[in-house]
Image (spheres, rainbow, N blue to C red):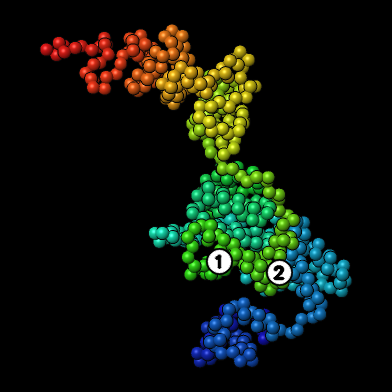
Amino acid sequence: MANKQIDMRKAKRIYKLYGEGASKRRISKELGISRNTVAKYIEFFKRYRLTPYEVSEMTLEEIQRLFKADQKPKSEQLRTLERYFPYFDRELRKTGVTRQLLWEEYYAKHPDGFKLSQFRYWYREWTKETSPVMHFTHKAGDKLFIDFTGKKLHITDKYTGEIQELEVYLCVLGSSQYTYVEACRSQKLSDFMRCTENALWFYGGVPRALVTDNLKSAVTKSSRYEPKVNETFADFAEHYETAVLPTRAYRPRDKAIVENAVRIVYTRVFAPLRNSTFHSVGEINRAILELLKAHNNVSFRGREYSRGSLFREVEVPELGPLPLKRYEIRSYAKGTVHKNSHIYLGRDRHYYSVPYRHIGKQVKIVYTDSFVEIYHRHERLAVHERKRQRYGYTTAAEHMPSHHRFVSEWSSEKFISWAAHIGENCKGYIIGILDKKQHPEQSYKSCMGILHLAKKVGNQRLDNACRRASDYGAYNYSMVERILKKGWDTLEDDPEDTSEVPDHDNIRGGNYYK
């Protein structure tokens, strides 16, 4: 054989042309290599009794291994070193471990072994042989690479037979390549965050960074230098005490590890499920988890360990702890601090107090299922437990000025209860006012004015006036006062006589049109 091997593609081409009857001189001229080299490669394939067709069907890696096997036997010194390589491969994933440190450990045990430069050379050769792509060692617990697969799975409606396509979320830890896969309905923010959260709890820990593609759920504005991360996803990362590292746009090598994982998942998850029928997302995800167990426990090619064993040995100790509870998705609203030192959350029709010195300011309201936060220019003014009681008030005493503490005694419940003592019509009318008015000062003053009329006309008349005002669809103090002043509350309704209308200054009468 030649001292320096030629490209394996040329080696295949040599034997293919030879099988087609080309002379060694012609092959030499066409491929630009010497006739002696052509002859040596032809003799090499003949010695193994391989046909040109068999050589053409072999992969480049298989031919490379064939040439390596034909070389002179390895020395005892090299065989000793190679026994350490799987151990070195695992150790290099740990924080602070370098090739220099591993060589020192090796050389302390084998003083007659290889020096550092030869040590590095033979380790590089081993990684080339055992890794299909360029070998890059990720530190344990450092990065979680996230992506969606290009192909989709689907579920079938049990009753209609309608097929619904599902997106497939995939993530892989950089060091151990321990993989998580989940089918979901979309790539929208809520589904993306839920899948990412499920992945973190699946791993039982949090890596130092989440490496995402430039999908809109993670990145609102891509940039080579300073991409803008989605506000909600950034808050999610802060909750789990990790960072978000978006990859560069149109740079697939930035996340080559997850791209490779996608190809493997097509074979080990998609293919086994291709002939199965599922009727729900939960059902298909349970099947995916079973296939993932097998995938994560398959040994790497050329190594004695699997993703699962590597994950448990080197990755788990380096992952950060999970928080006490899962992340709650936040929603946002804007509001103004009213004169009674409260803001109004329209979603629940509930009021929350803010320190009185911020009256009149525009604020940002951030709320989840369990709490409400109020901010002004990135300063948090107040935080309250979220309540869903309509027209209710959640008030912190320290938020109210001392000379306005009496305002805190006003509440929707107080006015509704007061109206109920007057009559059911009055109670319904007060509730209608609270529903109609936007500003709490307006509704409370209207309610106070109407309820005080009972002192002048009595409960019965006020209750009747509220009933008649409700029939007119007018919810305000002026209408009730006018009904009482005109005495319309004392008129009896005649269902058979609809010709009568109340006396009114603006009613012209029939003579006007003659």
Is 429 situated left or right of 511 in this image?
Answer: right
The foreground one among 420 and 56 is 420
**Screen quadrant of the C terminus:** top left
Q: Secondary structure at mark 1?
A: helix
The foreground one among 77 and 425 is 425
> To which quarter of the image does residue 490 belong?
top left
Q: Secondary structure at mark 2?
A: loop
Q: Where residue 270 appears, x then y in whole percent?
A: 52, 66
Residue at 61%, 56% in the rendered image: 145
Is 130 situated left or right of 496 in this image?
Answer: right
Which residue has dot 2 on it? 305
Is residue 200 shown above or below 21? Answer: above
Is residue 332 shown above or below 284? Answer: above
The foreground one among 6 and 364 is 364
Is 28 situated left or right of 79 in this image?
Answer: left
Q: Where residue 303 appears, x then y in whole percent?
A: 70, 72
Residue situated furthest left in the rendering = 514
Mark 1–mark 2 Cα distance, whole angstroms, equals 21 Å
Assess disc 2: are there few (<14), some (14-19) or many (≥20) residues with their C-alpha within 10 Å of its C-alpha.
Answer: some
Mark toward the start of the polypeptide (1 vs 2): 1
Residue at 75%, 59% in the rendered image: 94
Q: Where residue 450 appears, x then y in whole percent?
A: 44, 14
Q: At label 2, which amino acid type do we have?
A: Tyr
Residue at 63%, 46% in the rendered image: 326
| Whether label 1 touches label 2, CB < 8 Å | no
For marks 1 and 2, give the one nearer the viewer: 1
The foreground one among 15 and 154 is 154
Residue 269 shows which numbered tag? 1
**Screen quadrant of the N terminus:** bottom right
